[in-house]
Image (tube, grey):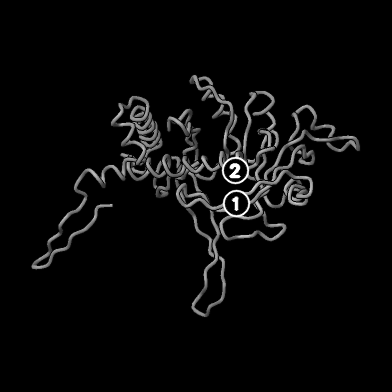
Amino acid sequence: GTNLETTKLYECCGKKTIRHKKRDKKGKSVEIEEHIYGFKVIYLYDYQSRIPLSVKIVQIQEHENQFLLELITQAKQNGAEIDKVLIDKGFIDGENLWRIKNEYGIDFVIPAKSNMHITELARNSGEMGIWQEREENKKKKQPHLKLYGISGLRIWDEYISPENTIHKNSKTFLPDGLNAIVITEWKNIKFNHGNEPVLLTTLPVDKPLEIDELYDLRSLIENTGNRELKQAWNLKNSPQKTENALKAHVFMTMIGFTLCHAFRIVTGDDLEKHGDRIFRRNALCTKVIIFTGKYYGIFELE
């Protein structure tokens, strides 16, 4: 999901309250409440073709996790064949993830939250884990990494079929099993015990490095998706302050973005790897001269 912030004058826009800490003039920490208005665009993105497979537009305060199954269902109706999804932490929901694996036959990788029991168990299971370590490789831009995989963790009570929810309070109840990756060292950081990042997955973890490298691809939706759409494709600039105009703008922008990636020639394929902003910067004159009286300045448009 990515926010499209607007003013409160936009028709049918949502409202979200965020709190952040600031220091007053006396240096005392105070909590400030801020209201932001707008919409949220949530989409499923194929990291190989860079094509959006399904798109949903909701109000900015809506939580992403309630739309995950809808996005996957729509993507499959659109003709996508999905074997695994790399999901942001905001989508973590036991029942939804169980259904993705058991009803859709799709594997997933998702970060665990620190306050989950399965996270604590994974962090305390290093002695039974399969360890791997990768040395720093500057040519490939790969930092040093040490981690381990642990299989069959049956402690997340929410990771069950909807029908078994009624048995959660039974003494013999056991949720379905999940695998986990625990990262103990990254770059020059050695994580303190209890603070290690944890990934949950239905994929085998006998080679935990492969799972971590796979999940790294999720960042492409931020770098080649959200950033490109907002900065190069003007996704944020709706032509009118109405809900219909904004939705039409988002869907038409997504269609153009999709066509650009779907029908590319060899030269276009090479250019596309760099993104539209970099292409413009390299291929076009992106500087302007601004005069005011006897003074002038040369500015970069970016």
Q: Which residue is mark 2?
A: 212
Q: Position of residue 202 (x, y in %)?
A: 68, 33
User: Looking at the image, which residue is at 36% across and 30% down?
Assistant: 261
Residue 105 marker? none
Q: Which residue is mark 1?
A: 145
Q: Quadrant of residue 184?
A: bottom right
Q: Going from the N terminus, do you reach mark 1 or mark 2 first?
A: 1
Q: Which-is-in-front pick, marks 1 and 2?
A: 1
User: Looking at the image, which residue is at 51% across and 25% down?
Assistant: 75
Q: Seen from this angle, which residue lies furthest bottom?
A: 26
Is residue 64 something that shows in the picture? no
Q: Seen from this angle, which residue lies furthest left?
A: 294
Is residue 32 placed above or below 260 in the rendered structure? below
Crowd rating for badge 1 (residues with CA inside 10 Å; few <14, some 14–19, many 20+): many
Kind of residue at disc 2 = Asp
Is residue 116 placed above or below 175 in the rendered structure? below
Q: Position of residue 270 (x, y in %)?
A: 32, 34
Badge 1 vs badge 2, beta-carbon distance below 8 Å: yes
Is residue 215 placed above or below 291 in the rendered structure? above
Is residue 5 something that shows in the picture? yes
Comparing 13 with 76, the one in front is 76
Q: Seen from this angle, which residue lies furthest right?
A: 171
Comparing 229 with 15, the one in front is 229
Q: CA distance from mark 1 to mark 2?
A: 10 Å
Under circle 1, the secondary element is strand
Is residue 286 placed above or below 215 in the rendered structure? below
User: Looking at the image, which residue is at 50% across and 33% down?
Assistant: 44
Q: Position of residue 280 (x, y in %)?
A: 26, 43
Under circle 2, the secondary element is helix
Q: Position of residue 288 (x, y in %)?
A: 17, 54
Kind of residue at disc 1 = Leu
